[in-house]
């Protein structure tokens, strides 16, 4: 069996100059793992959801041309922030997407970087280390099943693509041996207009994980257009489903839990599990 891991991101690496800012306060990088044999059904199912809930975005072209019209995760997030529970089409679309992922036994890894105020950011190091972590998690997933896999990341710039792939190249071909032996090759880069799983990864990052992070770590500390009260609504509606989507495992040496969604909190150093916790139940 072969698995594919699709990687996308939300947010940016611009530092936060102060607590009041319209710079995005977090960066999310996620990997969505899909059984290669189920990519077709996932793709067709997602295209059907797009046309069903957003019919005005599509004309009378061939249904397969619907892949070229993206339903951007940031737009879905804005709609929910504006209308909350009344954003019925958007919420049903996301619910349907998560149903498809559950039916297809897809799994998720992610790294969430919550920025500190006035702290410098090494964008190259953050992005590279996040991709390396995704590779390690995906490799552990493949090792457990004794299967092979391949990674497709949303394309950035040629220079950044080369940096990311080279960071994995140096691991796969190191003198001590290949620790990522079930990865068939280095990550390659695609355009989300052509890969439905990349579009799904965008929704997971931008519509769900990003506002879950701002609700959990930034509310009360950062003010600006990227931290909104209805982010808590998104968290309460979807946290349990994102939690169930994670692939987690234990390190063979230390027995420490790994994988899933890891959060680096630059504001107060809080733990990753805060992403899935609610004060009312503490």
Image (cartoon, helix red, strand yellow):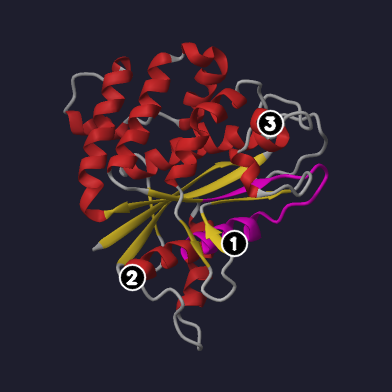
Residue highlighted by disc 3: 279
Image point (80%, 49%), residue name: 119
Indicate whether residue 63 is drawn in magenta: no
Query: Tag 2: Cα neighbours inside 10 Å, few (<14), some, or many (≥20)?
Result: few
> Outermost residue, bottom direction?
175
How far apart in space, not on screen, are marks 2 and 3 (Cα)? Answer: 43 Å
The numbered dot on residue 129 is 1
Residue reaching furthest to the left: 62
Residue 129 in the image, given as x and y percentages of width and height: 59, 62
Write the residue at 39% across / 50% down: 107
Image quadrant holding the N terminus, namely: bottom left
For mark 2, what is the residue? Answer: 184
Residue 263, above or below 188: above
Residue 223 percent location from the top left of the image? 76, 27
In the rendered image, the vertical position of residue 171 relative to residue 65, given as above or below: below
- Total labels: the figure holds 3
**Which residue is at a point 35% across and 48% down the rendered structure image?**
106
Magenta residues, start to end: 110-135
Residue at 41% in and 67% down: 186
């Amino acid at each position: 069996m072969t698995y594919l891991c699709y990687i996308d991101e939300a947010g940016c690496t611009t530092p936060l100059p102060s607590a009041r800012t319209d710079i995005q306060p977090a960066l999310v990088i996620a990997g969505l793992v899909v059984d290669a044999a189920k990519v077709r059904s996932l793709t067709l199912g997602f295209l059907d959801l797009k046309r069903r809930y957003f019919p005005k975005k599509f004309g009378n072209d061939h249904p397969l041309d619907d892949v070229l019209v993206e339903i951007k995760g940031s737009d879905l997030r804005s709609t929910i922030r504006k209308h909350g529970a009344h954003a019925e089409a958007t919420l049903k679309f996301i619910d349907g997407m998560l149903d498809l992922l559950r039916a297809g036994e897809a799994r998720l890894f992610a790294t969430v970087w919550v920025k500190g105020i006035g702290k410098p950011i090494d964008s190259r190091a953050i992005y590279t280390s996040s991709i390396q972590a995704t590779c390690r998690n995906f490799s552990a997933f493949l090792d457990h099943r004794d299967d092979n896999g391949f990674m497709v990341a949303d394309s950035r710039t040629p220079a950044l693509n080369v940096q990311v792939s080279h960071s994995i190249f140096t691991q796969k071909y190191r003198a001590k041996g290949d620790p990522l032996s079930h990865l068939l090759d280095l990550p390659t880069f695609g355009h989300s207009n052509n890969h439905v799983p990349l579009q799904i990864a965008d929704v997971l990052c931008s519509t769900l994980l990003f506002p879950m992070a701002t609700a959990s770590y930034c509310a009360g500390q950062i003010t600006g257009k990227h931290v909104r009260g209805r982010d808590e609504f998104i968290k309460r509606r979807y946290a349990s489903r994102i939690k169930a989507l994670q692939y987690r495992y234990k390190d063979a040496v230390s027995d420490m839990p790994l994988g899933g969604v890891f959060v680096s909190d630059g504001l107060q150093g809080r733990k990753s599990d805060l992403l899935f916790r609610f004060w009312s139940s503490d």
